[in-house]
Structures are given as structure tokens and as C-alpha cells.
Image: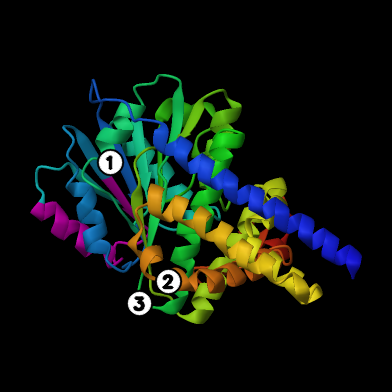
């Protein structure tokens, strides 16, 4: 037991160091002032749609309301009967001055339907700066102006926007949102400081057409589940700069019942482990509270470490949720943070096991390099 206690104590100490890194990384991110927009370049926004996300109309309206001189919005749905079509048509009538087009893609010929939609939209887009945003996001009116100013740097290939998660009316989505705002964003900020940005995150990615074409276009991304992550990684490999934008958007994750939330978070964990295997193992140090509780179980007399862990975790959480994201949810529901940390720790451990996920009612097999395919396709023939 003494050896186990010593190992746990070392892990807890490492997690305290990580918390300090989060605080410094948050300050460094905030210290980087965004550039002034000197010349507005036209932007094409690409937005894949699938069904009626909670708050979809307001989400899409925020993009029609961009305070920017020249932009267009392209939407893509799989079927003409998708209920999202009516929302797009309503907003197009409300904002007739905004150029907007809707594409009906049909069934995707490969696993990642989002990439298929993005590929078709890029082919139809008029402009060379492409802003790809998910349907469950909401942006301030200055989003395009902010990213356009950042892309005045000719060496910049990809920018990805940090996001503030906003839950629906369920405990499970509330816990997940707190985790995103205090844990996930913290990891982005520390990675930015320690090793530089070599990734992108899906809710909002902005890229030059030239960058995408040099990496092989969306055809190179089509078999990856985390196409956003590898897009940033491939751009960095080509020598382009990749950044965390100074523009923070909202990610409206909506309400989820327990089983749907469990499946979603398990899919995320398994996908993350395959996208960045070394980083996923190092994620252990992001859990000071669960590690301290394990230590207290092994050595009950060391319970003050739990209190110290709570202090370190709270400070790190506020650095991201408070300073960077200005998140009212975490400030209001701070007492849920320990429960979220325990749940996240459990999902992190579960992510080491299993190689299948369920997504939009279909079961997929995950390969070790982050690619995926329909499980039924794998049964029919050899893996690619």
C-alpha cells in the first residue's frame, strides 16, 4: 500500500503542476491582443445541417447577422425533406441581403458525412477564406471580422475558435458543459503554450482554401472521425501556422437524456484517444480531485490533500471558465464540479477500452490511427 500511496501522491503533485500551467496558459492567451482589421477579405461560411438542433433558428440567425462587409453562407443537408431546410428558408427571407445557398448532398459515399458536406460546399464556395461552423454553435456579430483580422498573417493556415458550452435543461448536459468549460478548454490552452497549436476543434474552424488543397483536400480527411483535429495537424505539418483564435463562440449542446449523453461522451473519449494517443495518456494529470480521493482511500490520514486538490482545481477552473470564457454556468453551478470531474475520470478510463462507437444511430469501428468505418462494412470485407 505504501508504494501505491507514493505513486498516487506523485500523480496528485503532477496534477497540481498542471493546474498551475492552466492558470499561466490562460493569462498568456488573454495577453495576446487580436490584430486590427486593415482589409476585409470576402469569406464563405460552410454549415452542414442535420435535423433540428435545439435553438437552431437562433444559432443560424447569429451568422446571418455578422457585422462584416462581404460574406456568403452555404448550407448542406442530406435530404431535401430535412426539417432544417424550412429554418434556412425562413432566415433567407428575413435577411435577403445575405447571399445564402442550400445544397442537398444525398447519402455520403464514406463514413464522415460532415466532411462530405464540407467538400461539396467548398467546391461551390466563391471565396478562398472558409469558415466552417457546426449547426449547434452561436457567434457574436464580430466573429468574421475577428478571424479576418487574424488571417492578415499570410503564414496562417488554420484558426480554431475556443467555445463556451451552453447546456440544455438536463443534469447530464449541464455536467458536460461544465467539463468543456473547465477541462477541455484548459487542455487547449496548455497545449497552445507548451507545444504550439497543432490541432483544430470542430465547432468553428477557419482555413484558407490553399491550405486545404495542399493537404489533399477533404478527400484526405474523409475517413477520420475527428476530422477537425487532423485538419489542424496536417496544416501544421505543411508549415502553416495554426492558432487558437481570440474569438470565443458558444457551443449549444442542448439537452440530452442519460443514455444519449453516455454514448456521446464515450464516443468522444474513444475518438480522442485515437487522435492523440500520447496526450490522452497524459490527461491523467488533469484530474486532481479523483486522484486525491483515491489517495485518501489508500491513506485516510492524508485527507487534507483532497482539500488542497479542490483548491487547485477551483483556481484552474476559474482561469478558463471565468477569465477566458466568461461562463455564467460554472459560476452558478460550481458545486457540480467535483461530480463532473468524477464522471470525466470514469469516461477517460472507459476510453481505453473498446473500438466501436455509435453515432446518429449507426455503429462504427475505430482504427488505431483515428480513421473509422461502418462496423457492417468491416464484417463484409478486410479493413482498408
Callout 2 secondary element: helix
Callout 3 secondary element: loop
Mark 2 vs 1, N-terminal side: 1
In the rendered structure, the answer to whether residue 327 lies left or right of residue 224 reads left
Measured Cα–Cα span from mark 3 to mark 2: 8 Å
In the rendered structure, the answer to whether residue 85 lies left or right of residue 8 reads left
Residue 319 is a magenta residue: no
What residue would you read off at disc 1? 143
Residue 171, horizontal then vertical, whole percent: 44, 78
Nearer to us in this view, 307 or 44 = 307
Residue 228, horizontal then vertical, whole percent: 51, 45
- Crowd around label 1: few <14 · some 14–19 · many ≥20 (10 Å): many
Tell me where the magenta segment starts and ends, as one range. 74-94
Report the residue at 77% width, 74% height from top: 301
Nearer to us in this view, 299 or 34 = 299
Q: Nearer the viewer, mark 2 or mark 1?
A: 2
Measured Cα–Cα span from mark 3 to mark 1: 27 Å
Measured Cα–Cα span from mark 2 to mark 1: 25 Å
The answer to which quarter of the image holds residue 154 is top left
Residue 367, horizontal then vertical, whole percent: 70, 54
Q: Are marks 3 and 2 in contact (CB under 8 Å)?
A: no
In the rendered structure, the answer to whether residue 107 lies left or right of residue 130 reads right
Q: Can you see residue 198?
A: no
Callout 1 secondary element: helix
Q: Which mark is residue 169?
A: 3
Q: Are marks 3 and 1 in contact (CB under 8 Å)?
A: no
What residue would you read off at disc 2? 174
- Crowd around label 3: few <14 · some 14–19 · many ≥20 (10 Å): few
- Crowd around label 2: few <14 · some 14–19 · many ≥20 (10 Å): many
Mark 3 vs 2, N-terminal side: 3
Report the residue at 46% width, 28% height from top: 157
Residue 84, horizontal then vertical, whole percent: 27, 63
Amino acid at each position: 500500500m505504501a508504494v501505491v500511496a507514493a505513486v498516487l501522491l506523485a500523480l496528485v503533485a503532477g496534477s497540481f503542476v498542471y493546474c498551475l500551467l492552466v492558470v499561466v496558459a490562460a493569462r498568456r492567451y488573454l495577453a495576446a491582443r487580436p490584430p486590427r482589421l486593415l482589409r476585409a477579405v470576402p469569406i464563405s461560411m460552410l454549415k452542414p445541417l442535420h435535423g433540428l438542433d435545439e435553438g437552431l433558428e437562433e444559432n443560424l440567425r447569429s451568422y446571418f447577422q455578422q457585422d462584416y462587409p462581404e460574406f456568403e453562407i452555404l448550407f448542406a443537408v442530406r435530404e431535401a425533406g430535412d426539417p432544417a431546410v424550412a429554418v434556412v428558408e425562413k432566415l433567407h427571407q428575413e435577411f435577403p441581403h445575405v447571399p445564402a445557398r442550400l445544397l442537398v448532398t444525398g447519402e455520403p459515399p464514406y463514413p464522415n458525412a460532415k466532411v462530405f458536406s464540407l467538400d461539396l460546399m467548398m467546391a461551390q464556395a466563391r471565396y478562398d477564406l472558409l469558415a466552417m461552423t457546426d449547426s449547434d454553435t452561436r457567434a457574436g456579430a464580430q466573429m468574421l471580422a475577428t478571424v479576418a483580422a487574424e488571417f492578415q498573417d499570410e503564414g496562417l493556415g488554420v484558426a480554431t475558435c475556443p467555445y463556451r458550452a451552453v447546456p440544455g435543461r438536463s443534469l447530464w448536459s449541464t455536467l458536460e458543459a461544465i467539463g468543456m468549460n473547465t477541462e477541455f478548454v484548459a487542455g487547449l490552452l496548455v497545449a497552445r503554450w507548451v507545444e504550439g497549436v497543432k490541432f483544430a476543434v470542430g465547432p468553428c474552424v477557419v482555413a484558407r482554401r490553399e491550405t486545404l488543397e495542399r493537404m489533399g483536400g477533404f478527400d484526405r480527411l474523409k475517413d477520420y472521425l475527428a476530422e477537425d483535429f487532423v485538419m489542424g495537424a496536417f496544416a501544421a505539418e505543411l508549415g502553416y501556422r495554426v492558432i487558437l483564435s481570440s474569438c470565443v463562440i458558444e457551443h449549444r449542446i442542448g439537452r440530452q437524456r442519460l443514455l444519449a449523453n453516455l454514448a456521446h461522451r464515450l464516443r468522444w473519449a474513444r475518438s480522442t484517444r485515437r487522435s492523440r494517443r500520447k496526450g490522452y495518456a497524459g490527461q491523467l494529470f488533469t484530474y486532481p480531485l479523483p486522484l486525491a480521493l483515491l489517495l485518501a482511500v489508500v491513506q485516510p490520514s492524508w485527507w487534507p490533500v483532497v482539500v488542497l486538490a479542490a483548491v487547485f482545481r477551483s483556481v484552474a477552473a476559474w482561469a478558463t471558465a471565468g477569465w477566458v470564457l466568461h461562463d455564467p454556468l460554472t459560476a452558478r453551478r460550481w458545486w457540480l464540479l467535483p461530480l463532473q470531474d468524477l464522471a470525466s475520470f470514469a469516461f477517460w478510463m472507459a476510453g481505453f477500452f473498446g473500438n466501436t462507437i455509435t453515432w446518429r444511430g449507426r455503429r462504427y469501428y475505430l482504427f488505431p490511427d483515428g480513421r473509422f468505418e461502418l462496423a457492417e462494412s468491416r464484417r463484409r470485407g478486410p479493413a482498408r
